[in-house]
Amino acid sequence: MSQPCQDNFSTTFSSLTAMMKYHEEQVKNSNWERIEVNRLQVAPLDQSSPLFSDTSAFADCVSGDAIKDTASNLGLALKLDGKYYPVRNTAYKGLLDRAKLGGTSLPKLKRKELAGMINSCLRLYPNAQALMLIRNEKISAAHSGDEHDYSILSMDELMSALTDHLDREYPGSVFEAGYSDHAFTNATWLLNGKRDELLDTYEKTLKAQGKGSLVSKLTPGIQFSSSDTGHASAKVSAMLLGGQHPIHIGGILAIEHRRQKTVAHFEKELAQLFAQFGDSIARLEKLTRIHLDYPGNTMTRICKKLALPKKASLEAIAMFDMALGGTPATAHDVYMAMQEILFILKTDGTPQGKLILLAENMARALTLRWSEYDLAKAVSW
């Protein structure tokens, strides 16, 4: 079992109380520091570097496990206030951004060479500020220190705002599950009390098409996700729950961690939740009226367009073609068949965090012009 200091740490929650307590503790144990970019000093931290065995050079909060884990992953440390901290992989891109470095060759460099290059570039920007996040014994983020570039939105405050809104406006809503790792946090709620209002038209349409058994299992829900180690927005997405895997049907609202945004901005956007959910359901329902001549080809082209994992996609496409047996299909049929990709990946042990991101990406299919993908010509993939 991984420890919180390790880069691959993740945890799940079956109760809202446990998840809120976790994030309240995370906030208490997080230290945000603004510092001039040219004062940042990076050092190699692989197993061959002198720093690896010099534990006295690290801050008191840094354990040997955190040092060893970093040596096996990013292999860099950063000095703040005279003491070193291991750098978590979630902070790597931000650190490169502060140095205005990029390119596919950088990861191939030895850690000593990479650290030297980063330091040389950091020294070029004496007037720039960095906002560093120290959490779980490591530098977990390296954001721009300009308040217009990055705004700290506390995870526990965001979740409290959402919970209060759901309790007030959506009686009967139920927390279903939560997930957190060092990169992002995710939580889902069932909107049991609003099922009839939200799914009425969609359910009638599917029943008229003889597919009532599918929708009878589904319940509307929402997914909250955010990150304070990356540039992901604090967002809420619409979902349908009750099937083999949650079905994402599009984003509802999003607040960027930028331009001095606050939790109050997030609370204001929540007022649009019901209307935006209705729009997402309408887009899904519209797919039932899009009839396809070449559903297998359409599904292949859509999956390729969205850059979904090829092996799992082709397996799901083959299953869909076999189930169809040459019968007609709609865009809705294809979109539902695409959900099998996530089930296949989950069965194969794909990390939950990656599954969540893939599901969000898959929902982009609802906004595509399906006729452009319904072609007789075979697809090369």
Image: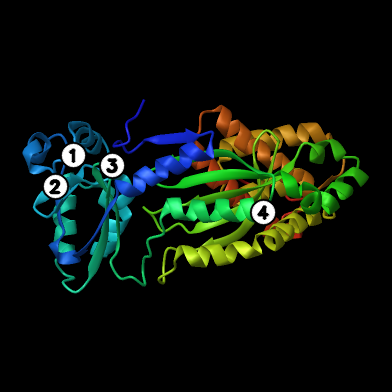
Kindly state the secondary structure of the residue where label 1 is placed: loop
Outermost residue to the front: 168
Q: Is label 4 or label 3 in front?
A: 3
Identity, as a three-letter code, of the amino acid under mark 3 = Asn
Question: On the rendered structure, is 131 left or right of 238?
Answer: left
Identity, as a three-letter code, of the amino acid under mark 1 = Val
Q: Name the quarter where the N terminus is drawn.
A: top left
Q: Is label 2 or label 1 in front?
A: 1
Q: Earlier in the sequence, mark 1 or mark 3?
A: 1
Q: Residues within 10 Å of mark 4 (few under 14, many from 20)?
A: many
Q: Name the quarter where the C terminus is drawn.
A: top right
Q: Can residue 103 be seen from the camera position used here?
A: no
Q: Is label 2 or label 4 in front?
A: 2
- From the image, tell me which residue sits under label 1: 62
The answer to whether the residue labelled 2 contacts the one labelled 4, judged by CB atoms less than 8 Å apart, is no
The answer to whether the residue labelled 2 contacts the one labelled 1, judged by CB atoms less than 8 Å apart, is yes
- From the image, tell me which residue sits under label 2: 84
* Closer to us: 323 or 43: 43
Q: Is label 4 or label 1 in front?
A: 1
Q: Position of residue 203 (x, y in %)?
A: 84, 47
**13 is higher (above) or lower (below) than 164:** above
**Residue 169 numbered mark, or none:** none
Residue at 14% across, 41% down: 60
**Residue 136 numbered mark, or none:** 3
Q: Earlier in the sequence, mark 4 or mark 1?
A: 1
Gap in angstroms between the C-alphas marked 2 and 1: 9 Å
Residue at 68% across, 42% down: 338
- From the image, tell me which residue sits under label 4: 365
